[in-house]
């Protein structure tokens, strides 16, 4: 079963969707746009995976992030882009970080070749930006399926944790649908922004059907012949909700 991560730095959204999501991804642009305290995010999401991106001097910044946040987050993952802003690759940096024991999510991958090279290094996650692949005229579903199949064939039998694809740049429920169908095994992930996840819950016909059934519904107490006064005396206990969950 494909895992779902929330692509956000908004702690309120994380709490809202905590019962659904399997982890969180962030990046510098999301943090600038949405705000949020990366330390608070790591503490809240742990032990689930949370990806935090390094920039600047990628090696030094990744090491600093790991040393700072790893004690707070059992599932900490450091994101490093496949390419530097000048077009040079980060393969040597990533290799050095993995040899230091850092869990790496190689991000901003746009091609099968890039995915193969990142997989060879032993990156825990390979993040493919499906929407941006489509922007450049690519066919993201085929790319995702090919990379997922390649990674699954490369994962050593019986060795955990398995390498996996994270599909990012999801902009609509249709994008999410195609991504999930492309990478449906349980070591692969689709990371979804909160507004898109909200839209995924909606369907006009489902809502009208629910309204129809609700109109015709007879409460259990009525079926049992218990009047309102009696019903008030035997309330059903509500499940306990942890403070701050919603």
Image: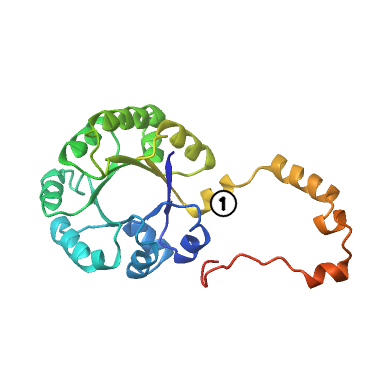
Q: Is residue 231 left or right of residue 75?
A: right
The quarter of the image holding the N terminus is top left
Task: Name the one closer to the observer, 168 or 220.
Answer: 220
Q: How is the image coloured?
A: rainbow
Task: Name the one closer to the observer, 130 or 4.
Answer: 4
Q: Secondary structure at mark 1?
A: helix
For the point 80% across and 72% down, which residue is it?
233
| Residue 43 to residue 7: above or below | below
Q: Is residue 236 left or right of residue 137?
A: right
| Residue 125 to residue 116: above or below | below
Say few, some or many: other residues with alpha carbon within 10 Å of mark 1 (under 14 / 14 to 19 / 20 or more).
few
Q: Residue 228, position in %: x, y?
A: 87, 67
Q: Residue 229, position in %: x, y?
A: 87, 71
Q: Is residue 144 left or right of residue 200?
A: left
Total marks placed: 1
For the point 40% across and 34% down, which residue is it?
183
Q: Residue 61, position in %: x, y?
A: 18, 61
Task: Name the one closer to the observer, 110 or 92.
Answer: 92
Residue that label 1 marks: 198
| Residue 117 to residue 77: above or below | above
For the point 50% across and 52% down, which residue is it?
20
Q: Residue 207, position in %: x, y?
A: 72, 46
The quarter of the image holding the C terminus is bottom right
């Amino acid at each position: 079963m494909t895992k779902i991560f929330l692509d956000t730095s908004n702690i309120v959204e994380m709490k809202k969707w905590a019962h659904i999501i399997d982890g969180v991804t962030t990046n510098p642009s999301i943090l600038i746009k949405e705000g949020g305290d990366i330390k608070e995010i790591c503490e809240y999401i742990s032990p689930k995976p949370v990806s935090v991106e390094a920039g600047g001097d990628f090696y030094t910044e990744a090491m600093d992030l790991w040393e700072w946040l790893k004690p707070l987050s059992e599932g900490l993952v450091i994101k490093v882009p496949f390419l530097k802003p000048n077009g040079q690759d980060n393969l040597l940096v990533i290799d050095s970080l993995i040899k230091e024991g850092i869990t790496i999510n190689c991000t901003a991958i746009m091609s099968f070749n890039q995915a193969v090279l990142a997989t060879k290094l032993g990156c825990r996650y390979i993040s493919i930006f499906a929407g941006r692949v489509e922007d450049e005229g690519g066919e993201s579903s085929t790319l995702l399926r090919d990379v997922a199949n390649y990674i699954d064939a490369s994962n050593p039998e019986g060795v955990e944790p398995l390498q996996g694809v994270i599909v990012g740049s999801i902009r609509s429920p249709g994008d999410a649908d195609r991504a999930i169908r492309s990478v449906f095994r349980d070591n692969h992930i689709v990371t979804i922004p909160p507004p898109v996840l909200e839209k995924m819950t909606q369907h006009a016909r489902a809502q009208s059907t629910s309204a129809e059934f609700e109109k015709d519904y007879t409460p259990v107490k009525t079926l049992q012949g218990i009047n309102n006064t009696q019903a008030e005396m035997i309330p059903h206990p509500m499940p306990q909700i942890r403070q701050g969950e919603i």
